[in-house]
Amino acid sequence: MATFTFELVSPERVLFSGDVDAVVLPATEGDMTILAGHSPVMTALKTGFLVITSTPGNGRRVLVRGGFADVNQNGLTVLAERALPEEELTQEILDHEILTAEMHYDATNDPAAKHAAESAVAQLREAKAALNY
Amino acid sequence: MPSLKDLRNRIASVKATQKITKAMQMVAAAKLRRAQTAAEAARPYAERMAVVLGNLASGITVGPETPRLLAGTGSDRVHLLIVCTAERGLCGAFNSSIARLARDHANRLMAEGKTVKIICVGKKGYDILRRQFAEQIIELIDLRSVRQLGFEQGDMIAQKVLARYEAGEFDVATLFYSRFRSVIAQIPTAQQIIPTQIEASTGANDAVYDYEPDEGEILETLLPRNLTVQIFRALLENAASEQGARMSAMDNATRNAGEMIKKQTMTYNRSRQAMITKELIEIISGAEAL
């Protein structure tokens, strides 16, 4: 299978850099899978799991919170505002994230921001549930 | 002529000082390594952000719908200076060179009849600037309690700046910080962050992009984030510069103390020898007189 270059950067560090088969992005308009040769696209990300498939049947999940994905002929670059690899996720971290998201929800009156915070909370709850398996 | 005891005390005091400066130098060296890795780790994100923003902005023309962060307010009457310095002194000319750059900038703007407002990040810059600009300083952001600089601090400052921008409190914002070149070279830098300055795209990217959601919406979320990234990067560069400056300042201080000890010890030994000779002469001449 054809591969492409993928880079996942958060403000604090580079989390992933290398060739991959496919990446599933939690885009704001719905999840999308990027394969090699994808047409150039730029999309905003919401809170959710980003799935990196480097070899068939072998995936890695990273929880991202907000950010951007940029697909061009050079490959895919994801600028995540916050990114946590699955291995580093614990219940406490998720609880903390949920709390911050809820505080965001309470702090704002703007309907769009309220909606975004609400879906972030839902996503994080889902992630927490998924982690228990 | 100081007595021998005075000299001894003086040497002991310089030695104690030397121990302190030596310890500070070593602490700064250890912290520098950490700060440097943090600054380097943050670089890819900031660079990528610039590229993405460049790609995006080169595709649009400035019009009435352009976000104000990119287009500006249309005037440049009120300037906001964000001066990032350290929380602690004893780091050579680090704080004062940033403050000097900011002061010159502020003076020039005021001479042009513009209004200047200052936000100080870090206590030292505030201490230096408040003497001259007590009325212009509108806020002091204290990062003393922060142990490890995170993205949150950058975000916090950016939110405060954005809130003021939205409220129409200023037209142009400039960030002052020290760029880390090497341990011995830190360059005080002024960087305009509002309106956002876009580096011209390299032109290699002329592929047609799909935008999801649309271009304007992406740009609207990307611009505030870019602001955060720029501030965060400035904070990290500043942290590395501060430790670098402190390290070389303390290295100098240790060396000076060493020189001083050498000189004092020499004087001490000389006067001790002189004393002994004097006593010997007294004994001998006393014996001869008998």
Image (tube, rainbow, N blue to C red):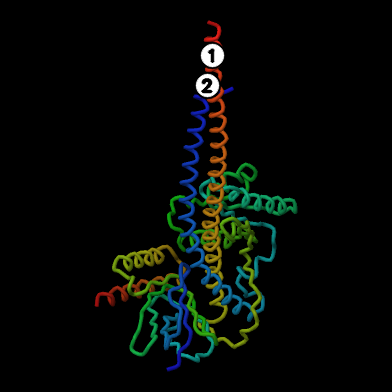
The x and y percentages for residue A90 are 30, 69
Q: Chain of mark 1?
A: B
**Residue B108 or B283: which is nearer the viewer?**
B283
Marks 2 and 1 sit apart, C-alpha to C-alpha, by: 12 Å
- Residue, x 60% and y 88% (percent of image)? B207
Q: Residues within 10 Å of mark 1 (few under 14, many from 20)?
A: few
Q: Chain of mark 2?
A: B
Q: Is residue B246 above or below residue B288?
A: below
Q: Is residue B271 left or right of residue A100?
A: right
- Residue farthest to the right, as pictured: B112
Residue linked to disc 1: B284
The x and y percentages for residue B176 are 61, 57
Name which residue type carries label 1. Answer: Ile
Residue linked to disc 2: B276
Identify the secondary structure beneath mark 1.
helix
- Residue, x 52% and y 62% (percent of image)? B232
- Residue, x 75% and y 54% (percent of image)? B112
Q: Is residue A51 left or right of residue B160?
A: left
